[in-house]
Amino acid sequence: MNIKKTLSAFGLFAGALTLSLPATAADNYPSRPIEMTVLFGAGSSADLAARALADGLSKELGVPVPVVNRPGGGGAVGYSYVRDQPADGYHIVWNSNSISTVHHQGNLPFGYEEFDAVAQVSTEKPVLAVRENAPWQTLSEFMEEAREAPGRMKVSVSGLGSFTHIAGAAMFNAGEATMTPVPFPGNEAVLNLLGGRVDATVQLPAALVPHVKSGKVRILGVSSDSRLDLFPDAPTTIEQGVNSNMEMWRGIAVKKGTPQEAIARLDAAIKKVTESEDFQKVADNLAFSVSYLPHDQFAQVIAEDDARIAELMAQMASSN
C-alpha cells in the first residue's frame, strides 16, 4: 500500500466533503424575502417612513422587503405577530416607544425584552401647540394658568396611553401643572384643536407642519433640549424652564434569539440606507430626524426609555 497516496486521496476526499457541506442559514442570510411589520395603518407618516426604509433595504440586501400593515391595540397586534414567528431574521418589526406604552398600559403581556434591537432609524420630538388666536404667547403663560386651575386645560392627544399622552403628562409634570387629556384617533386631535374644542394639543411635528405654515397653529414648546430645524422659531421646553425631554424613536427589531449574524447584516444595511440622500429627502418631507444608532446602543435606548415610561404611566395611574 502506498501510504502517501492514500493520505493524499483522503485529504482530497475530506476537502471535497467540507466544500459540499451546506452553509448555515445565518451564513446565507438573507436568502429570501424579509417581511417588515408596520404597527399602524397604510398612509400614515410612520408607514411612509417604513416603506422608504424597506425600499432601501431591498436594494442593499438584494431581496424583497415587503411591508405588511398589522394595526390594532396600539401596536399589540403587530408585536404579537412578530413574536410568534421563527427567530430567523425574516420577520422584522418597525418598532417604537409603543412597545413600552402598550405593555405598561396592560394591553400586551410581554415587553421589549422579547425582541432584539437591530438599529434605531429616526426620532421625532413632540410639541405643545395652540391655535394662532389663543391668549397664551409662551409655554410659561400656559403652564401658569394650568397651575392656577388644575385640570382645566384640555389637551388633545392621540389616544389614552399613547406616546403623545405620555409626553404631554411628562411636560406638565415638569411644569408642576396638570391637564385633562382628551384622546382622539388619527388626525382628529389636531382638527379638534382647530375647531376650538380643546385648549392645546401635544403632537409629533409631522401632524402640525401644514397648520404652522398656514399660521393657524402656534407652537409653545418643543419637548427637547434643542430646537427643531423644521420649526427654528419654536423654543424648547427646557429653555423655558420646563425640564421635559422626550422623543419618539423608531427602528427595527427582531424576535429575541435571532442569529447575531443576521442582526449584524440588517444593522449594516440600515446604516447605509439612513446615510443615503434619498432617505434624507423622505425624512425632510415627513418631518422626522434621521438618528441612526447601531444595535447595541439602540438596545440601551429602549431599556432606558422603558424604565422612564413605566414610571410615568405609574404616576398617571395613581393620579386618576
Image: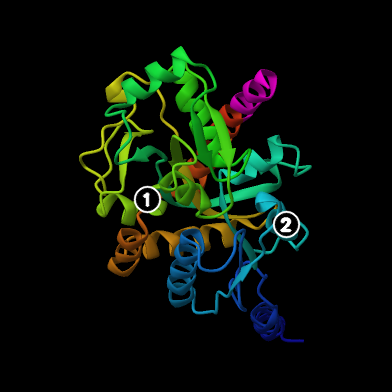
| Mark nearer the N terminus (2 vs 1) | 2
Q: Which residues are magenta?
A: 310-320
Q: Nearer the viewer, residue 45 or 277?
A: 45
Find the distance from the CA under tag 2 to the CA under tag 1.
28 Å
Inspect the magenta stretch and tell me whether residue 39 lies in it: no
Q: Which residue is mark 1?
A: 208
The percent coordinates of residue 89 (x first, y second) are 64, 64
List the single residue furthest toward the left: 233
Inspect the magenta stretch and tell me whether residue 318 lies in it: yes
* Residue at disc 1, secondary structure: loop
> Magenta residues: mostly which secondary structure?
helix
**From what the image shows, is residue 181 above or below residue 120?**
above
Q: Is residue 111 left or right of residue 123?
A: right
The residue lying at 75 percent from left, 38 percent from top is: 106
Residue 77 has which mark? 2
State whether residue 294 appears in this view.
Answer: no
The quadrant holding residue 59 is: bottom left
The residue lying at 70 percent from left, 40 percent from top is: 103
Decide: few, some or many residues near mark 2? Use Cα within 10 Å; few <14, some 14-19, many ≥20. Answer: some
The residue lying at 49 percent from left, 59 percent from top is: 46
The percent coordinates of residue 215 (x first, y second) are 25, 49
The percent coordinates of residue 114 (x first, y second) are 71, 46
**From what the image shows, is residue 77 above or below residue 170?**
below
Task: Identify the amino acid type marked 2.
Answer: Val
Q: Nearer the viewer, residue 105 or 179?
A: 179
Task: Identify the amino acid type marked 1.
Answer: Leu
Q: Is residue 299 left or right of residue 271?
A: right
Decide: few, some or many residues near mark 1? Use Cα within 10 Å; few <14, some 14-19, many ≥20. Answer: many
